[in-house]
Image (cartoon, rainbow, N blue to C red):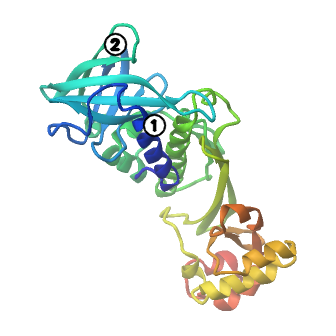
Amino acid sequence: MARPALLLAALLGAGSAAAQDQAACGGTPGAPAWAKSAAYRGTLGTLPIALQLTPGRFESRYFYERRSLDISLEEFRSGEQLILQEAVRLERGGDSVVTGCFTLMPAGTGLKGTWQAPGGPAAQPVTLSPLNALTLPLKAPNSPGLQRLRRDDPLAFLKFNRAWVRTASSVREPLSGLSYPRVANASGPLNAALQDRLLENAVSALDCRSLLPQDLQADPAAGYELRAALTLQKTRLISLREDVYYECGGAHPDNFSLGLILDRATGREVSPAVIWPKLTAARMQTLYLTGVRRQVEADCLDVLTQSPLEFTVNLKPAGLNLTPTSLPHVAAACAETVVVPYAALRADANAAGPYFADLYAR
């Protein structure tokens, strides 16, 4: 599972912001030749940490395992020494402040050195060993997304590979606090698909909280909020909608919606085109604009008719739900959801398809 695009640009920006005070830790920008992309786990003083080194990509980071919030690192070098400079924002509106300097050298297959706050007390010893996430036992239920995280982002896997809290109707990921619906009598593949949706949101939630200034990281009103709901359950199909609201320390909060249609047996996504092959993008836009005229003011209607729209879709008992996803942030309030009754789409449907009977009487 790749780090979500929603937060990747912000993470890159946070990394480059650390360059504001290149003299804080000393050295010359860039890593020594021996430094390669790798994940490590070890101790800083007596505290367990995990560290991802990604030279030249502004993605190096580490976290204290007791907190699990990433701290961005920027690479410098002094001779053969690797210097990793950490910087954080202490309060909203403030600039990044350099809060620590790693000085590291190879030691066998790992790294050894020190960490010290600029102008602070004595340096703390740092010992790091390679982190091979593929050798760690699974503590969360196995799923394709968890395995991708294990392979592609060992630090995130280390955080989220833990027992999750299950009830009859939901699953809660304890580190992020996010919950996701459960489906009664779900197949194994469907349970895995739902877990992976929660996992992707949980990774985003912790990335978001890591980007907040420190005075907001403990504020429950800041960060990342997920509202996920089952909107339809049928014999062959289920559908869900995710609404996410996030404030990650940028200029303003933001939000997005995601609709999902899943095959109940396989857990795989079902494209609306599989159910309604004749439902073209142009027809979808026409149906949307016809329905939305009764829901929005004239100024929003002007925005909605200016250019082709992109939609996220989910199913409800009343019909196909269309929600625009392509509006600029300033017009996001115009993104009303329109419900297109299934009867209006019957002529577009594949009557011989596996999902027809879930939505239409023969």
Q: The residue tagged with tag 1: helix, strand or loop?
A: helix
Mark 1, mark 2: which one is toward the viewer?
A: 2
- For the point 63% across and 87% down, the residue is 282
Examine the rendering and report whether any part of residue 214 can be seen.
yes
**Disc 1 or 2, which lies upstream in sequence?**
2
Most foreground residue, 304 or 279: 304
Q: Would you place residue 331 above or below residue 77 in this image?
A: below
Label 1 sits on what residue type?
Answer: Phe
Q: Quadrant of residue 157?
A: top left
Check the image and name the residue furthest to the left.
108
Quickly name the residue at label 1.
Answer: 160
Name the residue: 85% across, 72% down: 295
Q: Position of residue 105 (x, y in %)?
A: 18, 25
Q: Residue furthest top?
A: 122
Residues 276 and 167: in front is: 276
To which quarter of the image does residue 289 belong?
Answer: bottom right
Give the amino acid at mark 2: Gly
Tag 2 residue: 45
Return the residue nearer the eye: 296 or 72.
72
- In the picture, the quarter occupied by the C terminus is bottom right
Image location (x, y in percent) of residue 180: 61, 47
289 on left or right of 74: right
Locate residue 161, reporting x and y percent: 42, 36
Q: Is residue 209 above or below residue 185?
A: above
Spatial CA span between label 1 and label 2: 24 Å
Which mark, by number, is residue 53? Answer: none
Give the residue drawn at x 48%, y 33%.
163
> Could you tell me which secondary element the residue under label 2 belongs to?
loop
Graded by Cα atoms within 10 Å as few (under 14), some (14 to 19) or many (20 or more), the crowding at tag 1 reads many
Position of 327 with respect to 204 (left or right) is: right
